[in-house]
Image (tube, grey):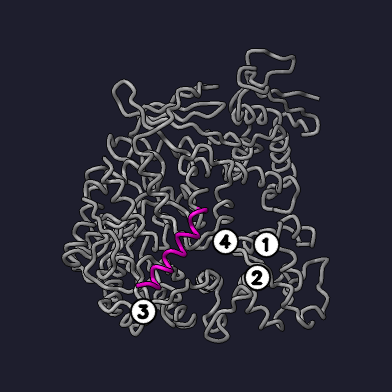
Amino acid sequence: MHDRLIQKLEILSDAAKYDASCASGSAGKRQAGKTEKVGIGSLTGGSGICHSFTPDGRCVSLLKILMTNYCIYDCHYCINRVSSNVQRARFTVKETVELTLNFYKRNYIEGLFLSSGIVGSPDITMESMVRIAKSLRIDHGFKGYIHLKTIPNASPELQAEAGLYADRLSINVEMPTQSSLNKYAPEKDLSDIHRSMNTLKEKIAEHKVDKTFSGKRPPRFAPGGQSTQMIIGADGSNDKTILGTSVKLYSEQKLRRVYYSAFSPIPDASEVLPLKPAPLVREHRLYQADWLLRFYGFGLDEILEDDMLDMDYDPKLSWALRNRHMFPIDLNKADKQMLLRVPGLGARTVQKILSIRRNTKLNWIDLTKMRLPLKKLKPFITVGDYFPDIHLLDSNNFELQFKQPKQFELFGA
Amino acid sequence: MKTITITTVPGFDEWREASRRCIAERIRPEHLIWQNSHSVQNELFSSDAEPCRSKIPRKMPQSKLSIPKSTLMLLKYALCHNDENRFALCYRVLWRVVYENKQLIQIKTDDDVIQLFAMAKAVKRDAYKMSAFLRFREISLEGQEHFVAWYEPEHFSLEIKLNFFQTRFKNMRWSILTPYRAAHWDTETLVLEDNPDSSVVPDHDRIENYWLTYYANIFNPARIKTSAMLNQMPKKYWKNMPETTLIDDMIKQSDTRTRKMISDCKTN
């Protein structure tokens, strides 16, 4: 390897940083067999390892690069669009494979996240990407994580082959509506994207069966499922439209994850774009809402009072503030679904409460021992020896106590 | 009063053997003093305390000593903690599980259980960080690729992660050195070495520069969230992670870089 490669790496990792996903988990476990003399890597199950963190708070888990940033498309939000003046570069198949293996051997990464601009045609591009994944798996026995960003218009055969080597496949919808796509990504077609997702969904389902009639286990096909990304705040779409699109993607296309990426200014940006970055708090609230929809049993109409999420309070607290008549909740009696709706109780805490309840009754001291956010919880709950002041929930300006200087956790993982 | 001296670190096997016997003999936790000799070499100087590795039959009456595997795992993690009280705490919990309440571990509000979970959690986190932040450097040993890492875990996490490294890097030759113990793997056999010599750890690697390049470029200067980074990667881990030397400059330059992007847009 020499300096030319350093330069390529600069260009092609810089170009990849706008993809929010860094997940390297949920593809099950995998490791080299006891007698295998070649091959490297493992999947540990669970949610993958973050090998480093950058000052933007993001986890570095995968070698996230573009195969090339040459592109025939002209999507306005994209730094690599054909009309942009960025420097261009292209990795060869061999370079990408070696870089991945060399990084992996030093314990820098969990695997590869490969995306690409469109060179020549969608099929030509996709074919090279598949070759990289195939070489890692077949030539080098690579057992680490591979995420391929599939090219929407590539042939179904190539997409099917990609799934044999990749743990996760993704296609970015980028914008929640066709009209936004028309404006910002004129070559992209929402129904094409959905058609590709649908093909993959069916393939994934086909391969999930434990055994076929002949008693053989089908080969693994993208065991980590599909994900996608939407850019927030570049077009005028409101949160209702965005989350509505997510709900559809989760239910109809069985996506594992939808990532939200607050639009941030890119070098050499197109003039159709806003100059200002979208507020990160909006992205954060969307992730919180997304979590409530998937893991906490909330419906879309419960989370959203109007078209936009409340920026001052997290969506669960915001729901509780609008539904004070349902509180306080008795932590010793309420069912799981209701416990999940209490502000300050996460899914894990709820599980803990349920397991403690089987053996003993919860008192206030127990809540302190569990290190729960008591200030937040206090007005919404009762336990054995504690009952909140009945006027508290109805008091004037009750909600103001929850307003606080903002601190964000990392939800993009 | 009976004193038991654990002579190895982390001491799980010794503790288990001694505990089996003490539980069978119904020695109450408050009648036991657990000691451990401070360093690995101390093993040579025998103390007056009764050694715990006497010839007791390995097979004890199963009915009393069978505890759920999940509890055993919990104890195993807690016993890799650097807290000297770990042996006493774990014995007390074991005693209570065997003689007082089989469901004890479920009571997450019990003080012993809280402490046990807290210790196990600290070890789990420490071990996770080891699998995440450890960096190998390549050397040539007897004409073959060999990867060497120096890592300073807070607890005895090497023991927890050995299996992970052996599985993931099965066909690689590697050595992981920690202040108290090293593990060497030659693709087939694992050799442990106490108090290794850290001077054999190389100070550079041919690929490291590519990693630094990647790290600097995958970062988005328009979204600085230093606290989120520090939360997950506190400074105590930095010294063995080559990429962290770049962080100060990345933060310093981020504002200028972002403003430049925006002003470039305006002039287009």
Where does label 4 land, which residue?
A409
Where does label 3 land, which residue?
A272
Where does label 1 land, which residue?
A353
Give the mark toward the camera: 1 or 3.
Answer: 3
CA distance for labels 2 and 1: 9 Å
Residue B11 position, x and y percent, is 61, 28
Q: Which residues are magenta?
A: B251-268
Dominant secondary-structure state across the stretch colored magenta: helix
Describe the element under mark 1 as helix, strand or loop. Answer: helix
Q: Earlier in the sequence, mark 4 or mark 1?
A: 1
**In the image, farthest residue toward the front:** B267
Contact (CB < 8 A) between labels 1 and 3? Answer: no
Contact (CB < 8 A) between labels 2 and 1? Answer: yes
Q: Quadrant of the N terminus of chain A?
A: top left
CA distance for labels 4 and 3: 31 Å
Number of the label disc, if any, that sits on residue A339: 2
